[in-house]
Amino acid sequence: MHACDQPTIQAIYPFDARGIAKRFRHAAIFGALDVLTAGETMRFCNDHDPLPLLAQLQTRYGGALEISYVQREIGAIVIDFTKRP
């Protein structure tokens, strides 16, 4: 079972990249992260490990964004992005 198919607690907002066209994904992800407030989490779901995206996020947000894997299996990647104060 993919972790994105499970209910989430309050202040965790799911973002399923699997249904977004590849050419729009990064812009959509940046837009979603930009509107998070401190303490909120975006639960990112994808079918592959987005290592280039993670490098871009580190450059763009630095220490303002906590990145932690929830699920890291072939075909089922789930990462929590939490906005720090």
Image (cartoon, grey):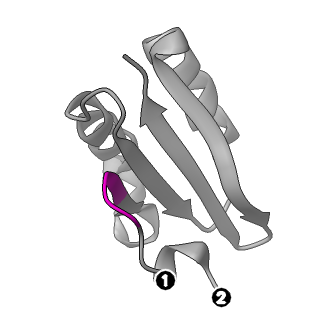
Alpha carbon distance from label 2 to label 1: 7 Å
- Looking at the image, residue 29 sits to the left or right of residue 70; the answer is left
- Helix, strand or loop at label 2? It is loop
- Residue 80 is covered by the magenta coloring: no
Quadrant for the C terminus in the image:
top left
Q: Position of residue 22 (x, y in %)?
A: 42, 56
Q: Is residue 43 above or below residue 18?
A: above
Residue drawn at x 48%, y 24% is 65
Label 2 with label 1: CB-CB less than 8 Å:
yes
Name the residue that disc number 2 marks: 1
- Looking at the image, residue 30 sits to the left or right of residue 74; the answer is left
Residue drawn at x 61%, y 80% is 2
Q: Position of residue 11 (x, y in %)?
A: 31, 51
Residue drawn at x 57%, y 18% is 58
Q: Which residues are magenta?
A: 9-13
Packing grade of label 1 (10 A; few <14, some 14-19, many >=20) is few
The residue type indicated by label 1 comes to Asp
Count of numbered marks:
2
Residue drawn at x 65%, y 41% is 68
The part of the image, by quadrant, that contains residue 54 is top right
Name the residue that disc number 1 marks: 5
